[in-house]
Amino acid sequence: MEVIVYSVLIFIIGLCFGSFFNVVGYRLPNNMSIAFPPSHCTNCNHKLGKLELIPIFSYIFQKGRCKHCKEKISIFYPIFELITGVLFVLCYLSYKDVYPELLNILFVIIFASSMIIIMISDIKYMIIPDEVLIFFSIVLIILKLYIYFKTENITSYIDIGYELIFILLDGLIMFIIMYLIRLFGNMLFKKDSMGGGDIKMMTYISFILGWKLSIVVIFLASFLALPLSIINMYKKNEHMLPFGPYLAVAALILILLKVDFNTIINLLH
Ligand SMILES: [Zn+2]
């Protein structure tokens, strides 16, 4: 019973955050302020009233159109609100029994939030904003160290220092691997094979998951991206597809299933 009440509550909170992530994901790549101007219709600049700011419901009641100018509102907005709500609940359900529960749930929810913002801005603009990666790296590394401090028998602050160095090394190793993949890809295809944003994004993911599991993320993402890439090639569509959303989905799958590198090695044996 308790689980259902919490799930519903977290779902509603997730919807509201999703609404906020839509704003962040759209405005940051355009170097616009997140806070000003307040939410408005991008067509007629009509400022949205309270009733037009309710996640999903506003979209449904207004039949997907601006109340003022009747311009169609992108289905993108309610979809990402819904995705955020569902993801938050999955984070909660997946980590509600992992000590320290509250910190772990918070950790995955923050990570999921970063992935959603990246998906939105990469799909819309093919940009993964540096600000997002830097902000979430700092917040999550601090939180990760705190969880480590809480769960392991830490006797001195030097241990935390070591842990921090390991986390930073994870990022560095991944950065080098991605850089080499890019060099190799550029040689093979004789054109830019990977965006710099993907390299930075994988460095961030590696801080969180470690470099070994992050390699699994790349493989899983490539696998997920395969069908669309083939269609793209078949249509002789030259423009590049954003890879960030696939990396995000792959990372989320691994973290929600609580996959660690050893389980994968055991599966392969
Ligand atoms: Zn309008």
Image (tube, rainbow, N blue to C red):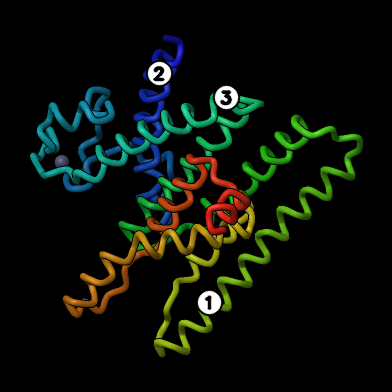
In this rendering, which labeled residue sits more in front, label 2 or label 1?
1
Residue 176: horizontal and vertical position, in percent?
A: 63, 72
> In 3D space, how far apart are the residues under numbered discs 2 and 1 (Cα atoms)?
43 Å
Residue 181, numbered label: 1
Q: Quadrant of the C terminus?
A: bottom right
Task: Specify the quarter for ligand 1.
Answer: top left
Describe the element under mark 2 as helix, strand or loop: helix
Q: Earlier in the sequence, mark 3 or mark 2?
A: 2
Is the C-beta separation of discs 1 and 3 under 8 Å?
no
Q: Is residue 175 left or right of residue 235?
A: right
Going by the numbered disc 1, the residue's amino acid type is Ile
Sequence-wise first label, 1 or 3: 3
Spatial CA span between label 3 and label 2: 18 Å
* Amino acid type assigned to the residue bearing label 2 in the image: Leu
Label 2 vs 1, first from the N-terminus = 2
Q: Name the residue that disc number 3 marks.
A: 97
Query: Which residue ends up furthest to the top in the rendered image?
Result: 1
Q: Quadrant of residue 245?
A: bottom left
Q: Few, some or many C-alpha atoms within 10 Å of disc 1 (few <14, some 14-19, many ≥20)? A: some
| Snapshot quadrant of residue 86 | top left
